[in-house]
Image (cartoon, rainbow, N blue to C red):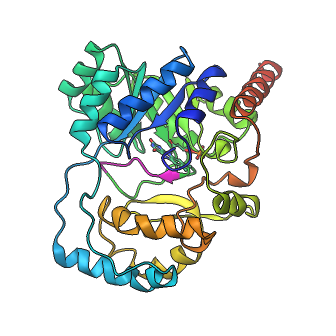
Amino acid sequence: MLGAGAEALAIAVSRAGGLGSFPAAGSTPDQLLESVRAIRAATSAPFAINLFIIDPCMPDPQVVRAAISRLAHWRARYGLPAQSPPAIWAQDFAAQFEAVLEAAPHFASFTFGCLTAEQARDLHKRGSRIIGTATCVEEALAWQAAGADAICAQGIEAGGHRGSFLTQDEDLGTLALVCAIKAACALPVIAAGGIMDGGAMAKALAHGAQAVQIGTAFLLADEATTSAPWRAAIAQVGPDSTRMTRVFSGRRARGIENAFMIEMREHERDIPAYPIQNALTQDLRAAAARSGGADCMSLWAGQGVQLARPGAAGDIAHAMWSDAQNLSSTTS
Ligand SMILES: Cc1cc2nc3c(=O)[nH]c(=O)nc-3n(C[C@H](O)[C@H](O)[C@H](O)COP(=O)(O)O)c2cc1C
């Protein structure tokens, strides 16, 4: 979970017997390798490294100027100076991928795109297994053709960014997506989205998922890097508090609705694609977080966020797993 989890959360989950995942999308290759060293120093358990597959971007200056002007009054509110385009729009995926090859983690997982068959072969040669994120059957089949070892089926309930890369307006719920991908694809399926307790975990496994991927249920974990205003917003949510939005990053993502999302909604269609809008809102979001301004932070969270509970990540993982096992044994 980029922005909400770093090495400590991945280590805690891996130590507890899960597959901890380190979000490396924002890391330079050197930072990625350093994080892998830190995880290996703390645990010999398997872990995953996660990257966003994005192409280098060369935005149209006019589009950038328009995006900057839409953000100007928000920047003024947080005392930020007039904005200039950033030196880089995003980390270079090709260089990050080389670092993942060098690090050779047990698992490498990807979202926002699909590897080439050659890239998949290179990872396999290094002994890494590949997890590809899919939000529809076509994307799962693309990952299967590329040589993935498992599919992360990301349902519409999931918090954070959609992993979509062949379509942008899919909306299948997690269980329906797991069943559809199982029917079309021979690979193991990992259910992601709305899994907040042992009951949901047991249900996903009963629908044919081989594993589950959990984000939102760890947002209040001791080891999560979720900022104080984000945690406070989570503590106050009602049952239907999240919305899908492009306004923070230019890519559809689910988060707790706030003033920025509501006010910027009229520009949804004009906002430049990821990573342009993401880079342009970065220091605004950081300034808001520093001053406790949850009104313009990206409060990524899934539909089940009301069920997030504080505690040690290992305890959260153990409790969910033992509840799921108890439920499975009482229903079988
Ligand atoms: C705060 C946050 C950050 C996320 N960051 C990433 C990420 O860096 N890479 C990724 O593949 N998925 C990311 N996701 C999506 C999760 O991998 C997963 O699909 C989702 O959390 C599952 O649904 P849930 O949030 O209902 O548990 C993120 C989710 C959240 C809530």
Q: Is residue 66 above or below residue 8?
A: below
Asked which quadrant contains residue 252, the reply is: bottom left
Name which residue lies at 70% across and 47% down: 220
Viewer-side residue, 332 vs 304? 304
The mark total stands at 0
Name the chief secondary structure element in magenta.
loop
Give the x, y percent position of residue 245: 47, 66
- Magenta residue check for 94: no
Stretch of the chain drawn in magenta: 160-166
> Where does the image place residue 50, in percent across and percent down from the top left?
41, 35
Residue found farthest to the right: 330
Q: In the picture, which quadrant includes the C terminus?
A: top right
Q: Answer whether residue 126 is visible to the viewer in this image.
A: yes
Q: Nearer the viewer, residue 6 or 206?
A: 6
Q: Nearer the viewer, residue 267 or 182?
A: 267
Q: Is residue 29 left or right of residue 254?
A: left
Position of 313 with respect to 208 (left or right) is right
Give the x, y percent position of residue 28.
Answer: 32, 41
Residue for point 73% across, 55% down: 306
Quarter occupied by residue 92: top left
Q: Residue at x 56, y 18 (%)?
A: 43
Does the rendering let one see residue 208? no
171 up-or-down from 100: above or below: below
Question: Horizontal and vertical percent for residue 170?
Answer: 42, 54
Residue drawn at (77%, 23%) of the image = 322
